[in-house]
């Protein structure tokens, strides 16, 4: 049986670990609430923007724009949204497994948002155009450079698609690794109607545009694209903090369970030591 001092030291060590994981759980819970609020609030803006754009597409009629034109896919451009830190359960592992299975390294170029993603890409020898950091505040200014870089590559013909690989937020306990297509918007009308929660198929209202509809569409398409990527980043941040809170709660619960088991083992060892001393004293008295 283990030495009493070793068991006491181990109990102390596990209790200290439990205090750390408990503190991390509380911090993650606080950040999770804010991240979830941002993600849910952003959905309303994204839905309204999609609704406006869906109506404008009908009013413009025939219109050629690089974002709306499909072409043969030779090279895929992917924004990989991962976490800056670890200790968030299987969140990154599931995302990286999906990337490995669905995105061949020979035909995919990546822009990484998050340190864990850039480390994964370097480790697996995948082509990384650039990597960026996104703080817990998830400001749009932090996401925009990554989008601009990949949009330029798309317009220059270096990549034929823009996609976002991220952890989709469903609820606090469920985060789903997803690859979301962004460009080209070949089925813009259907996608916008779906995102805008059922925009009318035909808007019969008479409208006047200032400036002309084509100019407005140019501006709105770029705004929609950047907002779409930003919304997915917000979803990924909500997933990150939710997964970390759940992982730290599980770690805290496991530590408490281990302390109980070690305390029981300590009591048994202590009882056995006392019994042994009594037996030794009794044997000495008999002798």
Image (cartoon, helix red, strand yellow):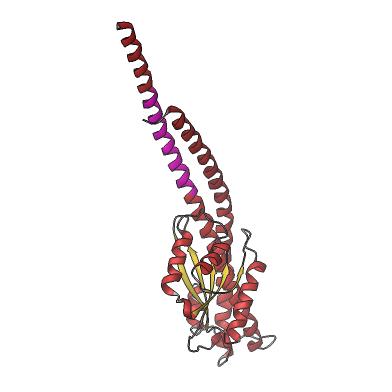
Compared with 171, 79 (above or below) is: below
Main SS, magenta region, reads helix
Say whether residue 209 is left or right of residue 61: right
Q: Residue at 55%, 81% (x, y): give it.
A: 54
Residue 186 lies in the magenta-colored region: no
Q: Which residue lies furthest to the right in this view?
A: 211
Residue 64: % across, % down: 57, 91
Q: On the picture, is 22 further left or further right than 137? A: left
Residue 185 pos. (x, y %): 52, 82
Work out whether residue 102 can be spotted.
yes
Indicate the quadrant where residue 1 lies: top left
Q: Residue furthest front?
A: 287
Q: Please state the horizontal and vertical placement of residue 190, each as a whole percent of the image.
A: 47, 81
264 above or below 242?
above
Q: In this rendering, would 102 be left or right of 69?
A: left
Q: In the rendered view, would you say 163 is above or below 264? A: below
Residue 266 place in picture, x, y as percent: 41, 28
Taking the image as drawn, is residue 221 in sight? no
- The image quadrant where one finds the C terminus is top left
Residue located at (58% from left, 48% from top) = 27
Is residue 249 within the magenta segment? yes
Q: Nearer the viewer, residue 54 or 271?
A: 271
- Residue 48: name its quadrant: bottom right
Q: How many numbered marks appear?
A: 0
What residue span does the magenta drawing correspond to? 248-270
In the picture as drawn, the residue positioned furthest to the left comes out as: 286
| Residue found 38% across the figure and 18% down from its top | 274
């Amino acid at each position: 049986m283990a030495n009493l001092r070793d068991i006491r030291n181990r109990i102390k060590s596990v209790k200290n670990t439990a205090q750390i994981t408990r503190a991390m759980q509380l911090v993650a819970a606080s950040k999770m609430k804010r991240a979830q609020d941002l993600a849910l609030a952003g959905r309303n803006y994204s839905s309204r923007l999609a609704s406006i754009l869906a109506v404008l597409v009908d009013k413009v009629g025939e219109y050629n724009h690089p974002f709306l034109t499909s072409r043969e896919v030779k090279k895929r451009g992917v924004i990989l949204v991962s976490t800056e830190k670890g200790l968030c359960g299987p969140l990154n592992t599931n995302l990286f497994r999906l990337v490995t299975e669905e995105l061949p390294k020979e035909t995919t170029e990546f822009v990484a948002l998050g340190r864990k993603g850039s480390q994964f890409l370097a480790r697996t020898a995948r082509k990384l155009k650039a990597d960026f950091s996104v703080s817990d505040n998830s400001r749009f200014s932090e996401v925009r450079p990554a989008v601009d870089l990949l949009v330029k590559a798309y317009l220059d013909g270096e990549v034929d698609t823009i996609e976002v690989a991220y952890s989709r937020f469903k609820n606090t306990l469920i985060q789903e690794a997803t690859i979301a297509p962004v460009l080209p918007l070949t089925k813009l009308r259907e996608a916008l109607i779906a995102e805008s929660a059922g925009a009318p198929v035909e808007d019969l209202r008479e409208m006047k545009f200032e400036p002309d509809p084509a100019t407005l569409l140019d501006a709105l398409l770029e705004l929609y694209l950047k907002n779409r990527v930003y919304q997915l980043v917000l979803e990924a941040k909500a997933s990150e903090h939710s997964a970390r809170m759940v992982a730290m709660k599980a770690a805290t619960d496991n530590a408490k369970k281990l302390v109980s088991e070690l305390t029981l083992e300590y009591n048994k060892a202590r009882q056995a030591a006392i019994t042994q001393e009594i037996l030794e004293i009794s044997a000495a008295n008999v002798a």
